[in-house]
């Protein structure tokens, strides 16, 4: 899925944004805690931030690894 973000633009090599988040989200509370902490840091340094996380495990891992489907 492609999602367009109108308010974030990469104009030159001196300007960047951070795409970060947990590999596996265990629940809404966890996602919000992580996002709030990262926002504190990115706001301090004026860095645009895109939260990225996943509820499903990587298809490349054996099935014994964590999978949380709610």
Image (spheres, rainbow, N blue to C red):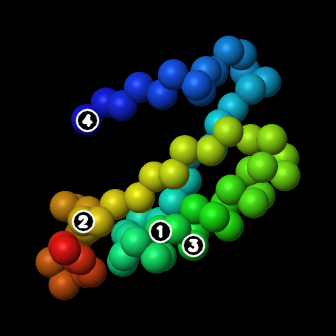
Q: Position of residue 37 (x, y in %)?
A: 67, 67
Ranked by sequence position, the earlier of labels 2 and 3 is: 3
Residue position marked by numbered label 1 in the rendering: 31
Mark 2 and mark 3: Cα distance apart in space: 19 Å
Residue furthest to the right in view is 44
Q: Who's the residue at 40% across and 71% down the image?
A: 28
Residue position marked by numbered label 2 in the rendering: 56
Secondary structure type for disc 1: helix
Ranked by sequence position, the earlier of labels 3 and 4 is: 4
Q: Residues within 10 Å of mark 1 (few under 14, many from 20)?
A: some
Residue position marked by numbered label 4 in the rendering: 1
Ranked by sequence position, the earlier of labels 4 and 1 is: 4
Mark toward the viewer: 2 or 3: 3
Q: Position of residue 38 (x, y in %)?
A: 67, 60
Ranked by sequence position, the earlier of labels 2 and 1 is: 1
Query: Do residues under tags 3 and 1 come within 8 Å of each other at their CB atoms?
Result: yes
Secondary structure type for disc 4: loop
Does residue 62 appear in this view? no
Q: Who's the residue at 36% across and 31% down the image?
A: 3
Q: Residues within 10 Å of mark 3 (few under 14, many from 20)?
A: few
Mark 3 and mark 4: Cα distance apart in space: 25 Å
Among the 4 quarters of the image, the one containing residue 13: top right
């Amino acid at each position: 899925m492609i999602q367009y973000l109108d308010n974030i633009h990469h104009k030159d090599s001196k300007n960047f944004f951070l795409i970060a988040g947990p590999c596996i989200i265990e629940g809404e509370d966890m996602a919000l805690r992580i996002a709030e902490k990262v926002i504190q840091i990115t706001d301090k340094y004026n860095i645009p931030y895109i939260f990225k996380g996943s509820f499903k495990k990587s298809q490349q891992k054996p099935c014994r690894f964590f999978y949380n489907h709610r």
